[in-house]
Structure formats: structure tokens, C-alpha cells
């Protein structure tokens, strides 16, 4: 399975600390193991899937696209959830 990253995803990774990157790596491994775990969005965003995971003490939304035909995952965006 191929994994690609968008430019905005790459930029957001650069801002993370080492321990945050480890949490992100765990989330990516879970997605690679089972790409269908993400909640599928609706309407115009129907290709996008989103998972929630903990990064330190913050809840993070992680958006990605699973291209079944091409056996590819495109990592789109990370975002913190405000409480």
C-alpha cells in the first residue's frame, strides 16, 4: 500500500514534538492496518475519512483519503478539537 502526504500535512508534522510524532505514527499504522476505520464524510467530502486520536492530552482529528482502486492512502490534515 502506498502512502502519500499533502503539503499541508507535511507542514503540520514539522511543528510537532518527538513524542507527538510517536502518537501520530501509531495513528498512521492503525490506518494502514485497517483503512476503513475512519468515519466516512458525506456529500462533497465523501472520499474523506476522519479518525480521532489522542496526542498527549489533546484530541486530534486526522483526515485521509483511502483510494481502494489504487491501493493508496493520502494523508490530508491534522487538527485539534476545541472543547
Image (cartoon, helix red, strand yellow):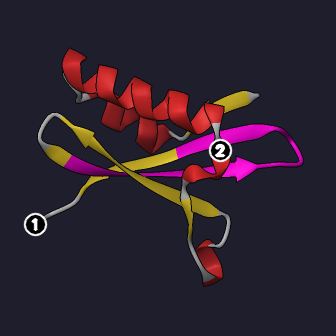
The prevailing secondary structure element of the residues shown in magenta is: strand
Residues rendered magenta in the picture: 59-75
Q: Residue 41 placed where, x, y %?
A: 56, 72
Task: Answer left or right for 68 relative to 8.
Answer: right
Q: Is residue 72 magenta?
A: yes
Q: Which residue is mark 1?
A: 83
User: Looking at the picture, does residue 54 appear above or below residue 2?
Assistant: below
Q: Where residue 35 is drawn, which disc sits there?
A: 2
What secondary structure is found at the residue carrying circle 1? loop
Q: Residue at x 82, y 48 (%)?
A: 68
The residue positioned 11% from the left and 41% from the top of the image is: 57
The crowd level at tag 2 (other Cα within 10 Å; few <14, some 14-19, many 20+) is some
**Image coordinates for residue 79, horizontal then vertical, percent:** 30, 53
| Residue contact between numbered discs 2 and 1, judged by CB atoms under 8 Å | no
Q: Please give the count of numbered marks on the rendered protein.
A: 2
Q: Which mark is residue 22?
A: none
Amino acid at each position: 500500500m502506498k502512502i502519500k502526504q499533502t503539503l499541508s500535512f507535511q507542514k503540520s508534522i514539522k511543528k510537532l514534538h518527538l513524542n507527538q510524532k510517536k502518537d501520530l505514527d501509531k495513528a498512521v499504522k492503525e490506518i494502514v492496518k485497517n483503512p476503513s476505520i475512519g468515519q466516512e464524510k458525506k456529500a462533497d467530502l465523501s472520499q474523506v475519512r476522519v479518525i480521532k486520536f489522542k496526542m498527549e492530552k489533546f484530541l486530534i482529528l486526522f483526515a485521509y483519503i483511502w483510494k481502494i482502486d489504487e491501493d493508496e492512502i493520502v494523508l490530508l490534515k491534522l487538527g485539534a478539537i476545541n472543547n
